[in-house]
Image (cartoon, rainbow, N blue to C red):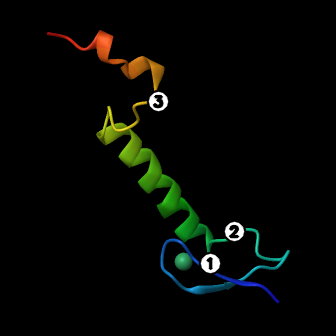
Amino acid sequence: MTVVTCPTCAKKVEWIEANKFRPFCSERCKQIDLGAWAEEKYTIPGAAPSDPLLDDDNLPQ
Ligand SMILES: [Zn+2]
């Protein structure tokens, strides 16, 4: 059996078909992780230099 670690709380999670939240241990941990990603994306503009909307030529002077 494959066991992975929950990215949110580091709890051991059995990688089984019945666990629809894998690799997370629960829906709560999944939501927390997704929320963290979204929050980071919005609070740190410019952190992703590959984003065409954040090209240096568009910076206000
Ligand atoms: Zn967890």
Q: Is residue 20 left or right of residue 58?
A: right
Q: Quadrant of ligand 1?
A: bottom right
Q: Nearer the viewer, mark 1 or mark 3?
A: 3
Mark 3 and ligand 1: say if the CB distance to the nearest ligand atom is below 8 Å. Answer: no
Q: Report the residue marked by disc 3.
A: 50
Which of the two residues, 20 or 7, is positioned nearer the viewer here?
Answer: 7
Q: Residues at badges 2 and 3 in contact (C-beta under 8 Å)?
A: no
User: Counting residues from the N terminus, which is met first, the one under dot 1 or under dot 3?
Assistant: 1
Mark 1 and ligand 1: say if the CB distance to the nearest ligand atom is below 8 Å. Answer: yes
Q: Residues at badges 1 and 3 in contact (C-beta under 8 Å)?
A: no
Quarter of the picture containing the C terminus is top left
The crowd level at tag 2 (other Cα within 10 Å; few <14, some 14-19, many 20+) is some
Depicted 15 relative to depicted 34: above or below? below
Instruction: Name the amino acid type tagged 2.
Output: Phe
Q: Who's the residue at 40% across and 31% down the image?
A: 49
What distance separates the C-alpha of mark 1 from that of mark 3?
Answer: 32 Å
Describe the element under mark 3 as helix, strand or loop.
loop
Q: Report the residue marked by disc 2.
A: 21
Q: Percent position (x, y) of residue 15? A: 76, 79
Q: Residues at badges 1 and 2 in contact (C-beta under 8 Å)?
A: yes
Q: Who's the residue at 32% across and 32% down the image?
A: 46
Q: Who's the residue at 69% across and 68% down the image?
A: 21
The crowd level at tag 1 (other Cα within 10 Å; few <14, some 14-19, many 20+) is many
Describe the element under mark 1 as helix, strand or loop.
loop
Quarter of the picture containing the N terminus is bottom right
Q: Report the residue marked by disc 1.
A: 25
Instruction: Name the amino acid type tagged 1.
Output: Cys
Task: Point out the residue furthest to the left here.
Answer: 61
